[in-house]
């Protein structure tokens, strides 16, 4: 979907007064909400630096194939559009600041892949099928510098060919008083960084979490909640808005506005990479 199309959908949704949602489910890990609450409460002080990335290895080999490799199905951006969009949504959600400028370097590490001539399921290598060469036009990895509207700077990297990284979505927020970091491969832990006292790791435990984040966790500490549970929490918030008769003024779930912003950010990143310069994010 283009940014023009998502802008039209957003306008229609807002005119209708109906509840609308974009499936950025990953922000609904309970400790991501905890990080957001602590940043909002100024536990880290002034936010200076927001950095991290999203690394996977499922497209490491030239024989790995998926529909996301086909621009007519997955779009002109791949790693940025597929997983970078989730990082940017999470970084903005946690920091409370919007990305307003980008400077990007994108790269296709495997310029020609071996496409199966038959259908292959997602995440399947299909090692024993007949193949043909398929030139690639979308990126396997990207590095992006970002500037936020609240004055913070940052950077993130995305890769679908980082061996051993299965779902390494991670961020760190550095501030004038402390730091907070989290990663999806250890999603039950939130790192709290201090300079003049011991740093700490907060385990997911409702009794030790902020009320707003504790509301998104159901199982006792030590009983892992994971990726599947993020969908439950996302749509529990959405259905609560439906039951209330319309969207709240400040929803904690991602709306069409967040989906449209992801498209606009993708456009800016693509332009920055093409023209090798900083680009302001408009729209």
Image (cartoon, grey):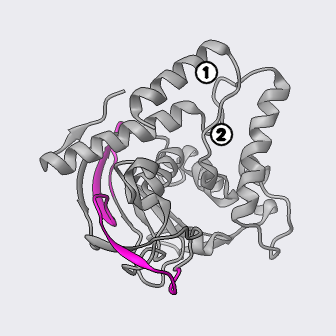
Determine whether 56 is above or below 45 in the image.
below
- List the residue tagged with mark 2: 253
Instruction: Give the number of the disc on residue 13.
Output: 1
Tell which of 108 and 190 is nearer to you.
108
- Tell me which residue sits at (47%, 72%) in the image: 56
Residue depicted at x 48% and y 84%: 164
Does residue 69 appear left or right of residue 102 in this picture?
right
Picture coordinates of residue 277 (x, y %)?
Answer: 14, 46
Badge 2 crowding class, 10 Å Cα cut-off, few under 14, some 14 to 19, many 20 or more, is many
Q: Position of residue 265 (x, y in %)?
A: 36, 41
Of marks 2 and 1, which one's residue comes earlier in the chain? 1
In the rendered image, is residue 202 in sight? yes
Nearer-the-camera pick, 241 or 119: 119
Which label was assigned to residue 194? none
- Up the image or down, 120 lies above or below 156; here it is below
- Residue 148 lies in the magenta-colored region: yes
- 127 left or right of 249? left
82 left or right, relative to 19: left
């Amino acid at each position: 979907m283009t940014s023009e199309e998502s802008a039209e959908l957003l306008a229609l949704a807002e005119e209708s007064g109906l509840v609308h949602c974009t499936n950025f489910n990953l922000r609904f890990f309970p400790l991501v909400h905890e990080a957001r609450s602590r940043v909002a409460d100024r536990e880290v002080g002034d936010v200076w630096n927001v950095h991290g990335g999203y690394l996977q290895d499922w497209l490491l080999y030239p024989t790995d194939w998926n529909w996301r490799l086909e621009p007519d199905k997955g779009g002109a951006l791949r790693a940025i559009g597929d997983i970078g969009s989730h990082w940017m949504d999470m970084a903005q959600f946690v920091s409370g600041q919007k990305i307003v400028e980008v400077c990007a370097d994108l790269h296709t590490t495997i310029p020609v892949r071996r496409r199966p001539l038959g259908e292959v399921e997602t995440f399947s290598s299909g090692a024993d099928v007949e193949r043909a060469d398929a030139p690639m036009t979308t990126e396997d990895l990207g590095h992006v510098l970002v500037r936020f509207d609240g004055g913070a700077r940052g950077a993130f990297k995305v890769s679908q060919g980082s061996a051993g990284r299965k779902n390494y979505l991670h961020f760190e927020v550095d501030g004038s008083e402390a730091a907070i970091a989290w990663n999806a491969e250890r999603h039950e832990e939130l790192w709290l960084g201090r300079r003049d006292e011991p740093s700490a790791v907060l385990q997911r435990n409702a009794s030790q979490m902020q009320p707003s984040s504790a509301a998104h966790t159901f199982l006792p500490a030590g009983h892992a909640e994971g990726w599947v549970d993020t969908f439950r929490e996302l749509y529990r918030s959405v259905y609560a808005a439906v039951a209330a008769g319309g969207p709240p003024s400040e929803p904690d779930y991602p709306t069409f506005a967040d989906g449209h912003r992801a498209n606009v950010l993708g456009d800016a990143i693509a332009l920055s990479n093409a023209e090798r310069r900083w680009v302001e994010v408009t729209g």
